Image (cartoon, helix red, strand yellow):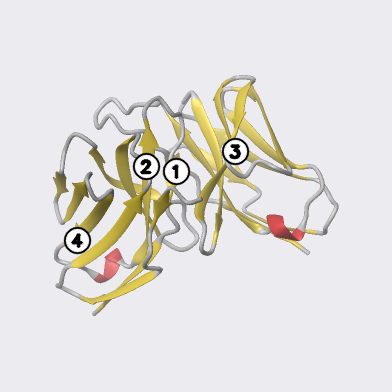
Amino acid sequence: DAGITQSPRHKVTETGTPVTLRCHQTENHRYMYWYRQDPGHGLRLIHYSYGVKDTDKGEVSDGYSVSRSKTEDFLLTLESATSSQTSVYFCAISESVRDRVSGANVLTFGAGSRLTVL
Amino acid sequence: DQQVKQNSPSLSVQEGRISILNCDYTNSMFDYFLWYKKYPAEGPTFLISISSIKDKNEDGRFTVFLNKSAKHLSLHIVPSQPGDSAVYFCAARSGSARQLTFGSGTQLTVLP
């Protein structure tokens, strides 16, 4: 997966417990993203980062926080997990806002982390 | 309010025939459009993109068409192969935005 590792790949937890998902990249890309995938909703952006300690909210950020203390790591934290946060979480990276070749913002995704909150 | 819509959750086609996946958008500021393919238990992978200044982009068996006046784009796969069976996501970006907005996806099944 192009130098992106997500951990854990699967997790089952209980309502009210904290959960942290980790995304690690070896590409030295500036931009990192967390998306969640749910049936009928596709991929929705939770938070993203445009540099170390620089983060911003996406469209479904409530209940989530992120941190990026190093270029290679982007952490997604659920402070108190709820059943509505049961989902598959994808991390993505991008070297720049505009891809050098295509001009589009081409994201490269990790393999995903499946989270079940009981 | 979904800015990128894929109204067909699923599509089945016979091997060798054409697959046409559709996507509509509402934000006229979108300047790039992308298609991603996703297999089960894997992350989405980039397939093809098109700039808003073009109306067609081709890459092998995959062609994307853009109709700006209708705010509509489509992905054509010719000929379709069983290995093309996957979920296809349409995505778009506006101006200097740093992120992509995705549609809800279409499950394509290519029957042998």
Element under disc 2: strand
Q: Is circle 2 on the same chain as circle 1?
A: yes
Q: Are marks 4 and 1 in contact (CB under 8 Å)?
A: no
Q: Earlier in the sequence, mark 4 or mark 1?
A: 4
- The amino acid type found where label 1 is placed reads Thr
- The amino acid type found where label 2 is placed reads Ala
Q: Earlier in the sequence, mark 4 or mark 2?
A: 4
What is the quadrant of the C terminus of chain A in the image? bottom right
Residue lying at 62% horizontally and 45% vertically, measured from the top left: A60
Element under disc 3: strand
Q: Is circle 3 on the same chain as circle 1?
A: no
The label number, if any, that marks residue B101 in the structure image: 1
Alpha carbons under labels 2 and 3: distance apart: 24 Å
Residue lying at 54% horizontally and 36% vertically, measured from the top left: A33
Identify the image quadrant of residue A100: top left
Q: Which residue is mark 4?
A: B77
Q: Earlier in the sequence, mark 2 or mark 1?
A: 2
Q: Are marks 2 and 1 in contact (CB under 8 Å)?
A: yes
Residue B90: give x, y in percent of width and height: 36, 51
- The amino acid type found where label 4 is placed reads Ile
Q: Give the label, 2 or 3, closer to the camera.
A: 2
- The amino acid type found where label 3 is placed reads Cys
Q: Chain of mark 3?
A: A
Q: Chain of mark 1?
A: B
- Circle 1 crowding by C-alpha within 10 Å: few under 14, some 14–19, many from 20: many
Residue lying at 83% horizontally and 57% vertically, measured from the top left: A15
